[in-house]
Amino acid sequence: MHFATARTNARRVLEAFRAARVGEYDFAPSVGYGYGDRGRDTLNAVFASALGCEAALVRQQIASGTHAISLALWGVLRPGGELLVATGEPYDTLQSVLGLRATPRSFAEWGITTRLLDLAEGLDPQQLRAALSARTQAVLFQRSRGYHDRPALLPQDLLPALLELRKAGVVSLVDNCYGEFVAEEEPAADLLIGSLTKNPGGGLALGGGYVAGRKELVEAVADRLTAPGLGADVGSFPAGKRSLFQGLFLAPHAVAEALAVADYAAAFAKSLGYHVDPLPLSERGDIVQVLRFGAKEPLLRFARALQEHSPVESSARPEPAELPGYPDPVLMAGGTFVAGASLELSMDAPLRAPYAGYLQGGISSAYGVEILRQAFLAAEQ
């Protein structure tokens, strides 16, 4: 199932490369202002086409998925406006951006308010339309579950709500993190937002993020990244762009491998008596597999066993730590070649009930299955 989807997605990625006439020159580094960087513009065009969008902004200067979402929201929201989050409480790090937690320089300081809808309200077109006010400038959907007990969303789950917002003339944004190339199409939103160390980086991107969608909105976001009037025409790539092009090229296959690893993890954990979500071989909206341990100690044992059997930093011992933007200590495990790369096999877990571990990635099912087999066995000893 996953590899049939990968073949469909590989066709659209390949067509995007061919349509943009990608050449060796496009991989070259650029420095300074980055004026005339043809490869940068070609990279944007390839991403836009592969994601089914008019335009894209792809930059290594975007530090994370939260940074990309923040940029997109600053690009479309204006003082005195309102943002609706249609999928309930957003991911922990985004709450500071939106002013849901008292944080300096958040949207709250600009008179931009945020209102949360529950998942049913946000996906039902009629309820969503009724929730719009004269101040509503944009609606944000979080495709992945974050740390919440709900399924990840597929593009078809979002489509009725997105079409309703289009009729209403309200900008729709989808946080697409962990969801790219899981299905045979991407959500039909005005803006799609994601991180290159997750799915679209194919395991090769060393950092970065993207915003893709309607051309005029992408231009507005580019002005926030650089400066009004400069937009996407500046910004250099001193290390070149080869890994970003090649990572996107490999992404459909890498995502299929990660989904196979998630199915294996779900089946193994379920056989040990753990509650898992999604169940093995279920339809998936993202690459994340939830393992609920029910208590702190088994979660710690598994995280340390996963780290011990990883290829990088296998001698490190994961410990819960305070991290910027998170209200609870977070446990992170997984020896990845790119620090924090979620498409590689890793796990993070906020230290709070029900003590769930959020496993993601595995760009090689052969390695992922072997690492998880050893980690599960070691954790049970």
Image (cartoon, rainbow, N blue to C red):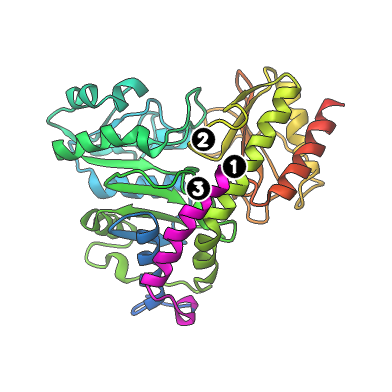
Q: Position of residue 268 (x, y in %)?
A: 73, 30
Task: Say whether disc 1 or disc 2 marks the residue closer to the N-terminus.
Answer: 1
Tell me the element at label 1.
helix
Which is in the foreground here, disc 2 or disc 3? 3
* Badge nearest the viewer, 1 or 3: 3
* Mark 1: amino acid: Leu
Which residue corresponds to mark 1?
Answer: 259
Distance in Å between CA atoms under marks 1 and 2: 8 Å
| Secondary structure found at label 2 | loop
- Within 10 Å of the Cα at label 2, are there few (<14), some (14-19), or many (20+) other Cα atoms? many
Q: Decide which of tag 1 and tag 3 comes sooner along the chain.
A: 3
- Is residue 362 placed above or below 168 in the rendered structure? below
Q: Which residue is pictured at 66% across the width and 45% down the height?
A: 345
Relative to 17, is 281 on the left or the right? right
Residue interval drawn in magenta:
1-27
Residue 116 visible in the displayed image: no
Task: Where is residue 299? Give x, y as percent.
Answer: 71, 26
Labelled pair 1, 2 in contact (Cβ < 8 Å)? yes
The residue pinned by badge 2 equals 284
Q: What amino acid type is highlighted by mark number 2? A: Arg
Q: 252 left or right of 331?
A: left
Q: Are marks 2 and 3 in contact (CB under 8 Å)?
A: no
Q: Amino acid at mark 3?
A: Thr
